[in-house]
């Protein structure tokens, strides 16, 4: 759906590029996690994917699904209807007086009929588990609730690619589970999800993991392959998922555990099998 060809981006006045020579593809229905230490270029890459920034060099090619029939500009860049992005701080995206007004803003700007706007708003609020907040003033929401409203607003646009830039950072565990459920539903509909995150447990759930260091891709592939390279993670200032750390320590103590172990349930099953042996 999106192809980056040798893309670099340098902010005005900066001595070095924030993103350097990145080549990457995002496929329909694929979940991609972008990880890296602070300042590695993750958020800049997310903005490039969403069309908010233009590459300094290289080019970004959008599929017809994204670039046509969606109010694209003359040079083929998506206008925001088919690629949606949610940032870490919801305050930068919320402008409506109430929850339902804010979620409805995007569809209203598309000039959709009122019944379609109502359908999208109700669906997005339900999928994010905040239907009970529909008439709540935005100013009366907690930080986590505001973030869920921001995600609902993005989903109401029915994007074909959803970019989440640390969108779960302010969410409590239950809200994170609801976001995971929402991600699963949109993936099943063929929506591509690009998740920029510091949470290695979250990153491990992706189909593919992309590791950035100083604006360059230093590794990408299945999470199991990338996150098992502990030396690489240490060099780039990242920590592996906690279950994997525990599995490594148990193996060092002579307990044989099979398979890549990135979540608690996988680790528990492996330990039970080891005990049974």
Image (spheres, rainbow, N blue to C red):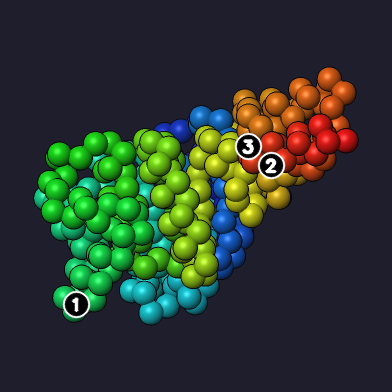
Distance of mark 1 from mark 3, alpha carbons? Answer: 44 Å
Front position in the image: 76 or 252: 252
User: Residue 98's spot in the image, x, y percent?
Assistant: 14, 51
Give the class, few, some or many, for how many residues have Cα within 10 Å of label 2's Cα (few <14, many ≥20). some
Q: Quadrant of the C terminus?
A: top right
User: Residue 104's spot in the image, x, y percent?
Assistant: 21, 63
**Which residue is disc 2 drawn over?**
266
Give the class, few, some or many, for how many residues have Cα within 10 Å of label 3's Cα (few <14, many ≥20). some
- Residue 257 location, quadrant: top right
Residue ID at (41%, 50%): 178
Give the class, few, some or many, for how many residues have Cα within 10 Å of label 1's Cα (few <14, many ≥20). few
Residue 115 numbered mark, or none: 1
User: Residue 18's spot in the image, x, y percent?
Assistant: 51, 38
Residue ID at (49%, 66%): 191
Distance of mark 3 from mark 2, alpha carbons? Answer: 6 Å
**Which residue is disc 3 drawn over?**
264
Residue ID at (47%, 63%): 185
User: Residue 179's spot in the image, x, y percent?
Assistant: 42, 50
- Residue 274 location, quadrant: top right
């Amino acid at each position: 759906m999106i192809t980056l060809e040798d893309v670099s981006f340098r902010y005005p006045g900066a001595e070095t590029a924030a993103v350097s020579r990145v080549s990457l593809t995002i496929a329909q229905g694929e979940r991609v996690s972008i990880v890296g230490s602070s300042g590695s270029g993750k958020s800049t890459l997310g903005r490039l994917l969403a069309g908010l920034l233009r590459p300094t060099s290289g080019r970004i090619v959008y599929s017809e699904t994204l670039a046509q029939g969606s109010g694209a500009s003359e040079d083929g860049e998506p206008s925001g209807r088919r690629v949606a992005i949610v940032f870490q701080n919801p305050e930068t995206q919320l402008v409506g007086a109430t929850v339902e007004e804010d979620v409805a803003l995007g569809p209203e700007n598309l000039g959709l009929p009122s019944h379609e706007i109502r359908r999208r708003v109700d669906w997005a609020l339900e999928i994010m588990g905040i239907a009970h907040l529909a008439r709540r003033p935005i100013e009366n929401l907690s930080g986590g609730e505001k973030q869920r409203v921001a995600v609902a607003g993005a989903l109401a646009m029915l994007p074909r690619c959803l970019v989440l830039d640390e969108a779960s950072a302010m969410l409590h565990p239950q809200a994170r589970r609801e976001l995971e459920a929402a991600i699963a539903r949109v993936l099943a509909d063929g929506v591509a999800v690009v998740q920029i995150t510091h949470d290695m447990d979250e990153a491990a759930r992706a189909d593919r993991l992309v590791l950035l260091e100083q604006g360059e891709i230093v590794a990408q592939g299945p999470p199991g392959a990338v996150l098992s390279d502990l030396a690489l993670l240490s060099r780039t200032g990242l920590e592996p998922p906690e279950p994997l750390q525990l599995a490594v320590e148990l193996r060092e103590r002579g307990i044989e555990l099979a398979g890549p172990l990135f979540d608690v349930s996988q680790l528990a099953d492996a330990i039970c099998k080891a005990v049974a042996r």
